[in-house]
């Protein structure tokens, strides 16, 4: 489904809905997506996120399988 088709479909569903809870949830989702969470992070959280990006670019990553194998003994207790 193309982006414009999806927008029309969602708009139609919102316009025809009488479910106030659903409408409030849609509003919350749309409001949250407009806010930039980055501004709400602490300096330490920002530094950690930036280091993570840097590590990814440098290839310093592990697969989920590698991590699970390493910590399996703690996860099964």
Image (spheres, rainbow, N blue to C red):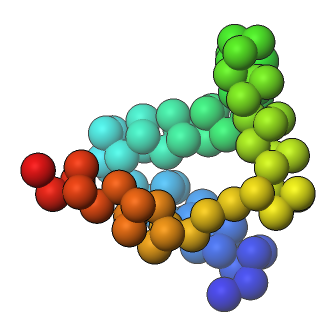
Q: Which quadrant holds the N terminus?
A: bottom right
Q: How many marks?
A: 0
- Residue 1 or 15: which is nearer the viewer? 1
Q: Is residue 11 visible?
A: yes
Q: Residue furthest left?
A: 77
Q: Is residue 35 visible?
A: no
Q: Residue at x 28, y 61 (%)?
A: 72
Image location of residue 4, percent across then percent down: 77, 75
- Residue 8 or 49: which is nearer the viewer? 49
| Residue 9 versus residue 45 in the image, above or below | below
> Is 15 displayed left or right of 71 in the figure?
right
Q: Residue at x 42, y 36 (%)?
A: 24
| Residue 6 versus residue 47 in the image, above or below | below
Image location of residue 55, percent across then percent down: 80, 49
> Is 68 displayed left or right of 67 in the figure?
left
Q: Residue at x 36, y 46 (%)?
A: 22
> Is 24 displayed left or right of 53 in the figure?
left
Q: Residue furthest bottom?
A: 1
Image location of residue 61, percent across then percent down: 69, 60
Q: Residue at x 65, y 74 (%)?
A: 6
- Residue 43 or 74: which is nearer the viewer? 74
Image location of residue 31, percent across then percent down: 63, 32
| Residue 6 versus residue 46 in the image, above or below | below
């Amino acid at each position: 489904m193309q982006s414009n088709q999806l927008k029309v479909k969602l708009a139609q569903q919102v316009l025809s809905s009488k479910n106030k809870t659903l409408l409030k949830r849609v509003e919350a989702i749309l409001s949250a997506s407009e806010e930039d969470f980055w501004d709400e992070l602490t300096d330490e959280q920002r530094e950690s996120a930036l280091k993570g990006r840097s590590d990814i670019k440098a290839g310093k990553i592990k697969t989920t399988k590698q991590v699970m194998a390493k910590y399996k003994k703690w996860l099964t207790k």
